Amino acid sequence: MSASESSSVGRRTFVLGAAAAAGSAALAGPLAPAASAAGFGWSDDGSNYVVDTGANLVFKVSKTNGDLTSLAYKGTEYQGYGGKNSHVESGLGTSTVTITQSGSTILISVAYGTLRHYYAARSGENNVYLWTDKADTSVSATRYIVRVKAGLFLNDEPDSYTYTTSTIEASDVFAKSDGQTRSKHYSKLRVIDYDYIGWTTGSVGLWIVRSNHEKASGGPFYRSLLRHQSADGGGLYEILYYGENQTEDQRFGLQGPYVIAFTDGGAPSSSLYHANLTTSWADSLGISGYVGAGGRGRVAGVGISGRNTAYAYTVGLANSVAQYWGSARSSDGYFSVGGVLPGAYTLTVYKGELAVYSTQVTVSAGSATTLNTITVPSSNDPSNASAIWRIGDWNGTPSGFKNADLMTYAHPSDVRAASWTGNVVIGSGSETAAFPAYLWKDVNSGLLVYFKLTAAQAAAAHTLRIGVTTAYANGRPQITVNETWTSAIPSPPTQPSTRSLTVGSYRGNNYTFTYSIPASAWLTDTSQYNVLKINVVSGSGTTGFLSAGTAIDAIDLLA
């Protein structure tokens, strides 16, 4: 369903990404008028600074702690559920809150210890611009939550976060009476997949437009909670740092702007998206850690050769201070990543989500670093190796494996999941679809793969490769062939220490296990099936779906 089609459905709740947004961006109206709108200004009601944008939006910020205490659009109050305000983390506590006006911009500054947070309003806009500058770990600030009253938007998304009385894992994964599961963790989307999230009734849209996430962590394919909605209200999140299944250390510094945007039902204006948003009007506001466009640079590549054109390629930049990414053009691999803070970065080329090339680049303020055509060596893509058989493909994800798609928005115990057990026969034509995306020590360890070899193949030693995308509790594969040869237990690679497979994320540190299988392990009768057994081993984990486990990228037996 297109954005314009979705917006015509009365009281319909939905999420839109950048691609879908293009068709309805015009519905949001202009980004900013040329002159101040009538009514634009601020007042002090004693407890809050009250900002009237001169359009249809009036919001209040507490003078005590910097909470957003009111968010009224066209006279309707949207802020608040469960007696809670909208705020950084779960609220900052007593803060120093000040307000200034400079022409058509109003800025509210919140100081809490080493943390600085900002709200800005522009004359004539139905937007609230936000920045958060976290300098260190002394303040717990990893998100901003817009808390929305119940009943204003229908809770009709198929996988909305719905509270029930049946908790199946920790205190944040629930089961409905029909056996379907819900959790705020189940976002479905990677960071690269969306520019904004929110809800619409068809006549009113409330959105949070994400920042460029330059000070977040996890890269372009990271998944984190984005929103939840239940009987008592809804929450929209801008995640500043999320620790669940995190692959990187926390970055510090200014994040933003991210934007709370109201529309007349359509998507927020595309000019607000992180890739297009220019905030030259904010250059002189004195925002802590702010670096304008003139203090940033760009990296551009002529192209990427050696690509597998069946896959999308992404180019990422990362160091301990910041992260960025951009898509490579499908025709030739051209890429351009702009708005980059000066510094030295590791540039990584991803086939799907699998890193296949890396180099170092230096970015300078006010200039572009131009790279000649990048050639991905054939050996860097494991798909190029000649294989006797292969299950899945090497793309850094469990895509195509059994239950893989469902696992980004459901618990493995969900009634919609196909059985996690079941063996696989090479040559059946359904090897990948029959192979489970995840393997657990306590659920489906001991899975069997049946395959035949020719006489020449059976006379030689071969290498078996098992690629994984993440692991929980140090789960890793140990193999047995024909019950006569068993591999050593491999050392566990570095993976996130938190939950992953049960909270909608397969993304960790891609790793390939290799096993050298001697010729003596194979059956010499070519009419018989060889049997590969894959066990999950670990001394950690508990039981069931929280036992040690791992997510599969691809498995192959090399020629």
Image (tube, rainbow, N blue to C red):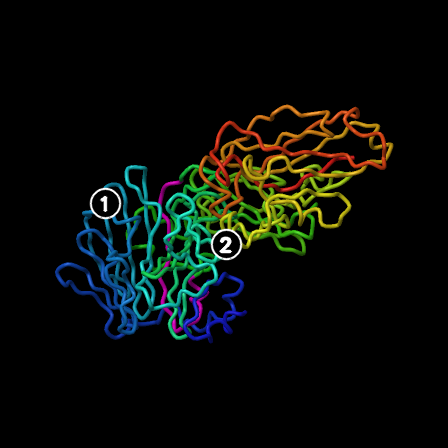
Q: Nearer the viewer, residue 482 or 158?
A: 482
- Residue kind at label 2, given as amino acid type: Lys
| Crowding near the residue tagged with mark 2, few <14, some 14–19, many ≥20 C-alpha atoms within 10 Å | some
Residue shown at 54%/39% (left/top)? 470
Which residue is labeled 2 in the image? 188
The kind of secondary structure element at disc 2 is loop
The extreme front residue here reads: 177
Q: Quadrant of the C terminus?
A: top right
- Residue kind at label 1, given as amino acid type: Tyr
Q: Is residue 449 visible?
A: yes
Does the magenta portion include 529?
Answer: no
Highlighted magenta segment, given as a residue range: 251-272
x and y percentages locating residue 368 in the rendered image:
52, 48
User: Could you give the CA–CA distance between mark 2 and mark 1, rounded to whole angstroms?
Assistant: 34 Å
Question: Residue 238 vs residue 514: left or right?
Answer: left
x and y percentages locating residue 199 in the rendered image:
41, 65
In the rendered image, the vertical position of residue 118 relative to residue 472, given as above or below: below
Res. 112 mark: 1
| The image quarter in which residue 537 lies | top right
| The image quarter in which residue 341 lies | top left
Q: Is residue 29 visible?
A: no
If you read the primary sequence from the N terminus, does the residue marked by circle 2 or circle 1 appear first?
1
